[in-house]
Amino acid sequence: MLKGLVFNIQRFSIHDGPGIRTTVFFKGCSLRCFWCHNPESIHHEPQLQLFLQKCIGCGKCFENCPVRAHRMVNGERIFLRELCISCGRCAEDCYAEALAIAGKWMTVREVMDEVIKDKPFYENSGGGVTLSGGEPLLQAGFVRELLEESKREGLHTAVDTAGNVPWEAFESVLPFVDLFLYDVKVADEELHRQVTGVSNTRILDNLKRLAGKGTTILIRIPVIPGVNDTPEEMERIGLLIKDLDNIEYADLLPFHGLGESKYASLGMEYKAKGYQPPEPELMDSLAEILGEMDIRVKIGRK
């Protein structure tokens, strides 16, 4: 039976498409954006998170770990991540919730059982289900089945994508998607490669092809200090999207550092440390640039 790797199912989501929604977050991403606020979404495998500030020192994880990744050395609690096999036994009995497994293999039925719990709210608000990540289209086979089942339930469907997947992944899900939330981070290819680890050529090619297929697209532009927060770069982004069909609007999303603690929990370096959210006046000026190009714009969570 086909399974997908999911790291969160967020109910009552209001920022990932119209109405009240449930957002299903898939694990695994082909980009390495240094500002990513969901680092637990990057790797396509379950991972143990350790939130040290929550640990009460009960010692239960020492007893449960089959590989002794959790130890006490000279009175100090030690976690040897290189030994961890992400079995989750330590997290099962962590009463303080200092330990958690990010990533769970689920069947379509298991995901749908969660999604349909709020069906009355979708119907009353014009909401539905959004598949996000990570990159959901890296698991295109599972995502297609989940979208098919969602349409059988009469749900509005949305897919949040960075676009760095083979075009065939888009083709496989197109008949079952009402809305694409499509990330456009940087126009310049070399700059895109520097800040995300990959070229944007395939991303932009896929966007152009998708715009010709008739499905509604919402462009999402994360505004990152020192990356794309200049008038010149925003104008270049605008030139890429202004003549595309089926674009509902562009959503400018200001950088935030709320994911920093999650990096520590995964033993990962947070490369956006010290970055500050852009000022409202800057966001307004960037939105004005796109507006002057006849692109409908929204800012952040307004």
Image: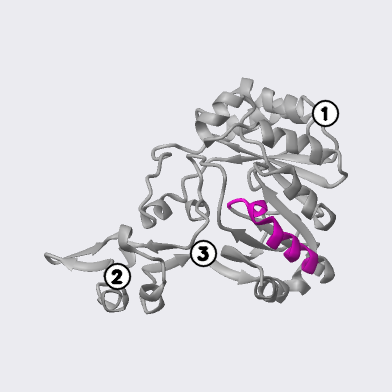
Residue 103 is marked as 3
Tell me the kind of residue under disc 2: Val
Identity of the residue drawn at 64% across and 52% down: 138
Tell me the kind of residue under disc 3: Gly
Local packing at callout 3 (Cα closer than 10 Å; few below 14, some 14-19, many 20+) is: many
Local packing at callout 2 (Cα closer than 10 Å; few below 14, some 14-19, many 20+) is: few
The residue pinned by badge 1 equals 243
Which secondary structure lies at badge 2? loop
Mark positioned earlier in the residue sequence (3 or 2):
2
- Dominant secondary structure, magenta: helix
Q: Where is residue 227 in the image (x, y as percent from the top left)?
A: 53, 29
Q: Position of residue 229 (x, y in %)?
A: 57, 28
Residue 67 is marked as 2
Where are the magenta residues, as a range? 134-150
Mark positioned earlier in the residue sequence (3 or 1):
3
Q: Distance between the residues labelled 3 and 1?
A: 39 Å
33 left or right of 168? left
Q: Which of marks 2 and 1 is in front?
A: 2
Mark positioned earlier in the residue sequence (2 or 1):
2
Which secondary structure lies at badge 1? loop
Q: Distance between the residues labelled 3 and 2?
A: 20 Å
Q: Where is residue 5 in the image (x, y as percent from the top left)?
A: 58, 63
Q: Position of residue 130 (x, y in %)?
A: 70, 58
Identity of the residue drawn at 70% across and 25% down: 289
Label 2 near label 3: C-beta < 8 Å?
Answer: no
Q: Name the quadrant of the N terminus.
A: bottom right
